[in-house]
Image: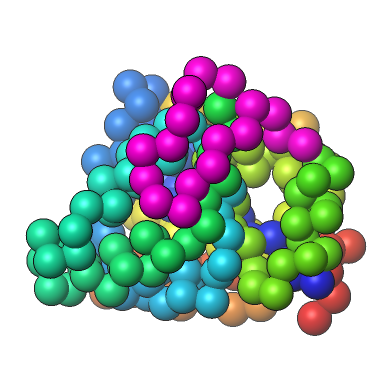
């Protein structure tokens, strides 16, 4: 059985976007290679429409990216991508399919049958999976900024007990925390 892992950047006050929808306060320079390594063992990524459209940038020819970003692009392009959207009519990237509804039974089946772990991106989609007790890990990149409002990394009134598995501090002040959700897939 694979794990379902929620990986996201967040401000210190818990937002993935500010009130204008921007996330330009995230400084990926110091953590880019680390995020690349986090994605290497992932086989499938579940995405909401907005995050998918942002990440579609990585589907261009690998040679067009700076050398230090090419490995990430290769990994992204090989991932199986499932996009949940009621408005997209089709995928614009390789290895991608669009699903209209986030079917909890289908996600449970995917977890049971997948040989590799699964990542979930997008706070709204991750919130649905967390509420259904499908998420096994939360991996947060805490950025040293307070944005004061916007889209939260977690839904209001959602409560889960977490166990810290590891923590890493980067030179820019970003802190990566990896938590196991108690009740999720055991380690």
Look at the picture and state if 13 lies above or below 95.
above
Q: Residue at x 49, y 47 (%)?
A: 96
The answer to if 89 sits in the magenta stretch is: yes
- Quarter placement of the C terminus: bottom right
In depth, the one of 158 and 109 nearer the eye is: 109
Task: Answer with left or right where residue 70 lies relative to residue 107.
Answer: left
Percent from the top left, x then y, of residue 35? 40, 68
Locate residue 76, reporting x and y percent: 39, 61
Q: Position of residue 176 (x, y in %)?
A: 47, 68
Q: Where is residue 94 in the image (x, y as percent from the top left)?
A: 39, 51
Q: Residue at x 46, y 30 (%)?
A: 90
Residue 129 in the figure: left or right of residue 42:
right
Q: Which residue is drawn at 77% across and 61% down?
A: 111
Give the camera-side residue of 114 and 156.
114
At a point 54% along the width and 42% down the height, the residue shown is 97
Q: Is residue 45 visible?
A: yes
Based on the picture, tell me whether residue 70 belongs to the magenta stretch.
no
Q: Quadrant of residue 78?
A: bottom left
- Numbered range of the magenta stretch: 86-103
Q: How many labels does the image show?
A: 0
Q: Is residue 14 visible?
A: no
Q: Is residue 43 above or below residue 86?
A: below
Main secondary structure found in the magenta portion: loop
Q: Quadrant of residue 174?
A: bottom left
Quadrant, the N terminus = bottom right
- Residue extending farthest to the right is 183
Q: In which quarter of the image is residue 72?
A: bottom left
Q: In this view, does 185 lie to the left or right of 61?
A: right
- In the depicted structure, whether residue 77 falls above or below residue 71: above
Give the colour scheme shown: rainbow
Q: Which of 20 and 76 is in front in this view?
A: 76
């Amino acid at each position: 059985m694979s794990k379902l892992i929620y990986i996201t950047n967040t401000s210190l006050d818990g937002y993935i976007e500010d009130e204008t929808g921007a996330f330009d306060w995230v400084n990926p320079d110091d953590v880019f290679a680390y995020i690349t390594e986090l994605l290497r063992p992932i086989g499938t990524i579940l995405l909401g429409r907005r995050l998918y459209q942002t990440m579609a940038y990585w589907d261009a020819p690998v040679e067009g990216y700076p050398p230090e970003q090419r490995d990430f692009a290769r990994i992204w392009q090989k991932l199986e991508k499932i996009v949940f959207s009621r408005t997209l009519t089709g995928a614009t990237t390789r290895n991608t399919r669009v699903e209209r509804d986030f079917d909890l039974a289908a996600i449970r089946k995917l977890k049971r049958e997948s040989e590799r772990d699964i990542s979930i991106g997008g706070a709204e989609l991750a919130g649905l999976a967390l509420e259904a007790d499908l998420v096994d890990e939360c991996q947060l990149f805490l950025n040293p900024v307070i944005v004061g409002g916007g889209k939260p990394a977690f839904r209001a009134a959602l409560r889960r007990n977490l166990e810290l598995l590891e923590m890493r501090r980067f030179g820019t002040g970003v802190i990566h925390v990896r938590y196991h959700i108690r009740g999720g897939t055991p380690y």
